[in-house]
């Protein structure tokens, strides 16, 4: 069971940032495993088990990131990530283009939410087509966001604004990709097991958005 991260977790991330070399990492690998990797895996496993117990038909899987960068992407001479994350999503060959629940911890803070790493243009076109067909229904979906402060809509926008059918749908209509995001600073909360409760509550709130987004792939091509 997740018992919280610790000040040692934060210390390790900062030290790795300034000593991102194989020799240093190997000398401190036990610290990584105990203070960073183990609590991240415990958090991801607990949250996943609790969410899938409530939503057993969603077909979610659980992944925890590796600390090692892909060798093909080590262009800066730094072979290790200074952050780690876990995710929950449906199995997909193109996970970057499907909606994903995620939590990330890095030296400066933490964040979690739901969204795409990089949505396909066709996916966002299908979203706009749905909004066009029934903007009121989409407004009903997003209305709970106005009554809370945990999550905010984020993501890259088109430089040339598209004309949305209503004012309330405009922010969503103009996203190239999107996430519903909460960002926090590293402090007492991440040192407590209550962090798991917060993530579970957050993912419950986001589940209607996930259910909506995951079905976009089955919509007809709006260009047809």
Image (cartoon, rainbow, N blue to C red):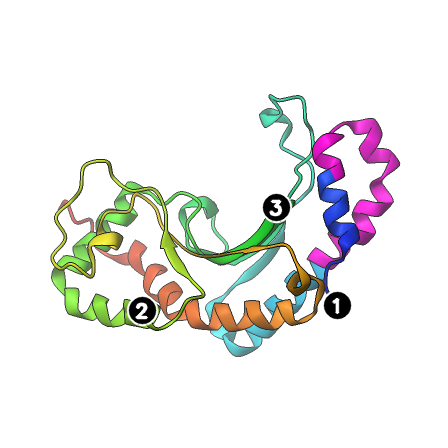
> Magenta segment, principal secondary structure?
helix
Q: Which mark is residue 3?
A: 1
Residue to which mark 3 is pinned: 108
Seen in the picture, residue 86 relative to 189 is either above or below; the reply is: above
| Residue 218 point in image, percent of width and height | 28, 57
- Tag nearer the camera, 1 or 2: 2
Q: Quadrant of residue 180?
A: bottom left
Give the extent of the magenta segment: 15-40
Position of residue 224 in the picture relative to residue 75 (left or right): left
| Residue 146, numbered label | 2
Decide whether residue 13 is among the magenta residues. no
Give the residue at x 82% y 53%: 34
| Neighbours of disc 2 within 10 Å: few (<14), some (14-19), many (20+) | few
Q: Position of residue 75 (x, y in %)?
A: 60, 21
Q: Residue 214's spot in the image, x, y percent?
A: 37, 60
Q: Between label 1 and label 3, give the one nearer the viewer.
A: 3
Q: Give residue 204's mark.
A: none
């Amino acid at each position: 069971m997740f018992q919280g991260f610790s000040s040692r977790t934060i210390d390790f991330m900062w030290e790795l940032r300034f000593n991102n070399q194989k020799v240093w990492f190997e000398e401190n690998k036990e610290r990584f495993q105990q203070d960073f990797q183990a609590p991240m895996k415990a958090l991801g496993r607990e949250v996943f088990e609790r969410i899938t117990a409530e939503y057993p038909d969603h077909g979610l899987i659980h992944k925890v990131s590796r600390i090692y960068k892909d060798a093909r992407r080590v262009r800066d001479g730094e072979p290790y990530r200074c952050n780690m994350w876990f995710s929950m999503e449906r199995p997909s060959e193109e996970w970057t283009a499907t909606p994903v629940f995620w939590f990330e911890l890095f030296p400066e803070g933490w964040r979690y939410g739901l969204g795409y790493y990089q949505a396909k243009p066709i996916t966002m076109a299908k979203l706009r087509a749905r909004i066009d067909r029934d903007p009121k229904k989409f407004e009903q979906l997003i209305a709970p966001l106005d009554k809370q402060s945990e999550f905010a809509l984020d993501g890259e926008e088109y430089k040339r604004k598209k004309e949305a059918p209503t004012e309330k749908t405009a922010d969503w209509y103009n996203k190239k990709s999107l996430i519903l995001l909460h960002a926090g600073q590293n402090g007492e909360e991440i040192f407590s097991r209550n962090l798991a409760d917060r993530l579970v509550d957050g993912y419950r709130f986001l589940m209607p958005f996930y259910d909506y987004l995951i079905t976009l792939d089955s919509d007809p091509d709006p260009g047809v």
